[in-house]
Image: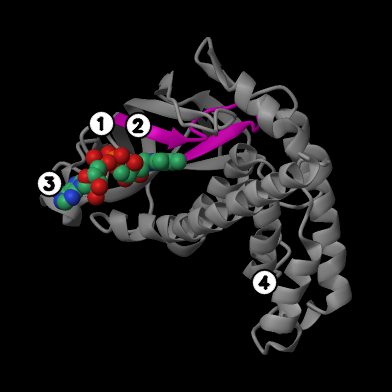
Amino acid sequence: MAAYTPPLDDMAFVLHDVLAVHDSPLPGYADLDRAFTAAILDEAGRIARDVLAPLNATGDRQGCRLENGTVRTPEGFRRAFELLRAGGWTSIDCDPAYGGQGLPYVLHAAVGEMHSAANMAFAMYSGLTHGAYTAIHAHGSDAQKAAYLPKLVTCEWTGTMNLTEPHAGTDLGLLRTRAEPQSDGTHRITGQKIFISAGDHDLAENIVHLVLARTPQAPAGVKGISLFIVPKYLPNPDGTLGERNALSVGKLEEKMGIHGNATCVMNYDGATGWLLGPENAGLKAMFTMMNEARAQVGMQGLAQAAGAYQLAAAYARERL
Ligand SMILES: Cc1cc2nc3c(=O)[nH]c(=O)nc-3n(C[C@H](O)[C@H](O)[C@H](O)COP(=O)(O)OP(=O)(O)OC[C@H]3O[C@@H](n4cnc5c(N)ncnc54)[C@H](O)[C@@H]3O)c2cc1C
């Protein structure tokens, strides 16, 4: 049996018979008739079944490798990521002003559910990028939006979120990463982050890290945290890539079942960062990304349960 069968009938039932998306007065929903959603979900499901699911077990067994400071993803991930980008699957609900398709988030979520069920480790690379896109879209200056959003929409560049530190997970008020203001308006970011999903890889030409840090006079606790854009390669004013930023992968960490996603210790050694949103309001800005991540984690749980159910049902039927 196939490792994953896209639940297209169930999705059509939820979208049209339960949610009645085709009747919704919300902006962007007018296009969502049954034929339209079926065409999109059919093709997304084919990619999940034929491209992503076959890379799931092999990707987990092979895992990511750290070679000379760069993370190599498992065999087949690069080609699959290019296919995802070329088909516009990373831009479904993104703002057309930055190259997105402007379709409702519900369609993006349905596609994401199938891709997560087929290969969660793989789907996390574009999933985190979407979160970084949302945070910059909500809190970035016009110049930051122009510089980063078109690249994140297409996943030419990918995104990460850097909250956790060795001594600060749940209690982010304790975080110690420092941000020293510079005369040119940038900040120098110094500190260590752990458990950073998609922290480094070979799927995109640049990686845009969103990093929580403290400025020198910041008040203690969560009211003294700011958010910074810290790209792996510093973009030139014309959008081309400039020099490598002062950040590196300390090591790859272990996360059961998602070895195909690079979970990294990230070291920032005076890296150049740009403030995203107001100083000391960084946790609020980061929660734009975190809240999306929370919804995605719930969706991933559903996706894993659906995939596990399919395998269990097939095994029960075959094992006479
Ligand atoms: C699959 C996965 C992906 C992840 N990806 C990222 C990522 O991309 N970027 C990132 O920054 N992080 C990431 N993380 C890390 C994640 O954010 C942390 O694991 C999480 O914040 C919890 O922190 P911790 O693991 O240090 O646990 P702890 O904070 O040590 O918590 C352990 C237990 O102690 C309790 N606890 C902790 N502090 C207190 C307190 N003050 N009062 C009462 N109870 C408390 C907690 O509720 C919990 O039950 C990821 C984690 C996982 C599992």
Q: Which residue is mark 4?
A: 104
Of 37 and 25, nearer the camera is 37
Residue type for callout 3? Gln
Contact? badges 1 and 4 (CB < 8 Å): no
Looking at the rendering, the quadrant in which ligand 1 lies is top left
Residue type for callout 4? Pro
Judging from the image, what secondary structure is the residue with disc 1 in? loop
Q: Which badge, 3 or 2, comes first in the chain's sequence?
A: 2
Q: Which badge, 3 or 4, comes first in the chain's sequence?
A: 4
Q: Is residue 223 magenta?
A: no
Residue at image coords 80%, 78%: 31
Residue type for callout 1? Pro
Q: Which residue is mark 2?
A: 194
Q: Is residue 197 magenta?
A: yes
Q: Which badge, 1 or 3, comes first in the chain's sequence?
A: 1
**Label 3 environment density (alpha carbons within 10 Å; few <14, some 14–19, many ≥20):** few
Residue 240 figure quarter = top right
Q: Which badge, 1 or 4, comes first in the chain's sequence?
A: 4
Q: Which residue is mark 1?
A: 166
Q: Which badge, 2 or 1, comes first in the chain's sequence?
A: 1
User: How far is mark 1 from mark 4, CA to CA?
Assistant: 38 Å
Question: What label sits on residue 217 in the rendered view?
Answer: 3
